[in-house]
Amino acid sequence: MTCCSCEILTPLGGSGVSTVWMEHNKKWLDNYTWYTSSVKGVGCARNNLLSMAGAEFVLWLDSDVELEFDPVPVLFEVMERFGVEGVCASQLTVGDKWFLRVAAEMDKLDVERRGGVRVVEARAFQCGLYRREALLKVGGFDSLFDVAGEDNDVVRRMIAEGMLVLQCSRVIVKHHVDAQRYWGKFKGYHRGFSQLAATMKDNYQPEVHGPAIDLSMFKRMPLKYSLYKLREKLALM
């Protein structure tokens, strides 16, 4: 039994190939209708999925995200309790990119410091439950964002309409980073963030105004770099 009228939406980045994590996640999401899209351009792919959906709620789930249980009941409970339009999961980055893992760890700690729930303004669509009508109300996704930034842009427009999206630490998913393809994709990510920065108010999302390699991460890390690398190696043994 599902807790609400919900469908699963997964953009495939134009590849049309289901990953091993999607196969893994099916055991948790067998009760839901699941749509995928191979339309090129992530903004267009998400709009394509939104046009397929007919349920009151949609769970956006990227193909490289691994679930440990059905996240919908927990996310739905938080959504109903706070009366918001979306709730996303916290995430752990799995891969050999140390700065992504540190960022994910800091993100999780920040949510926990706020009692397990906080308002987010960015990157909230890798695993997140949304009211479908809320996304339609703001016009869906902007096709300008063909690589990255489309989720930041939608959340920004939702906030402008008086809506809120929360992040909940009760659901922590694993985001698998493709180490071989990451740097090739990173250039596209930064282009998307530059496009986003050009359309937003100053200081609204300052993380997208910085350079591609954010050296301030060294100052913001909860552990010194050398100690973190040692901890990372021990964790991978």
Image: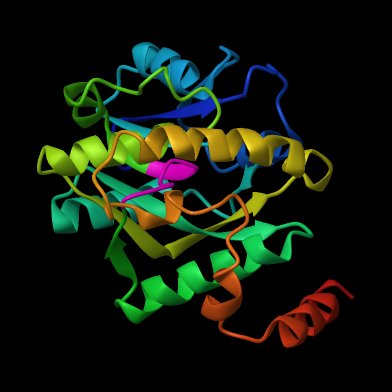
Image coordinates of residue 112 in percent, x first then y, are 39, 77
**Residue 126 among magenta residues:** yes
Q: Quadrant of the C terminus?
A: bottom right
**Is residue 234 placed above or below 77 in the rendered structure?**
below
Report whether residue 192 is seen.
yes
**Measuring 68% from the left and 16% from the top, which residue is drawn there?**
16
- Residue extending farthest to the left is 162
Image coordinates of residue 149 in percent, x first then y, are 45, 36
Q: Is residue 155 left or right of residue 49?
A: left
Q: Is residue 188 left or right of residue 229?
A: left
**Residue 235 among magenta residues:** no
**Is residue 99 placed above or below 226 in the rendered structure?**
above
Which secondary structure type mostly characterizes the magenta part of the structure? loop
Chain part drawn in magenta: 121-128
Q: Is residue 16 left or right of residue 219?
A: right
Which residue is at the front of the view, 199 or 72?
199
**Measuring 46% from the left and 15% from the top, which residue is drawn there?**
44
Report which quarter residue 215 is drawn in. bottom right
Report whether residue 59 is seen.
no
Report which quarter residue 110 is drawn in. bottom left
Q: Quadrant of the N terminus?
A: top left
Colour mapping used in the image:
rainbow
Q: Is residue 115 left or right of residue 98?
A: left
Which residue is at the front of the view, 72 or 211?
211
**Is residue 12 placed above or below 177 in the rendered structure?**
above
Count up the numbered dots: 0
Which residue is at the front of the view, 9 or 151?
151
Image coordinates of residue 186 in percent, x first then y, are 66, 41
Image coordinates of residue 3 in percent, x first then y, are 31, 43
**Measuring 54% from the left and 70% from the top, which residue is drawn there?**
216
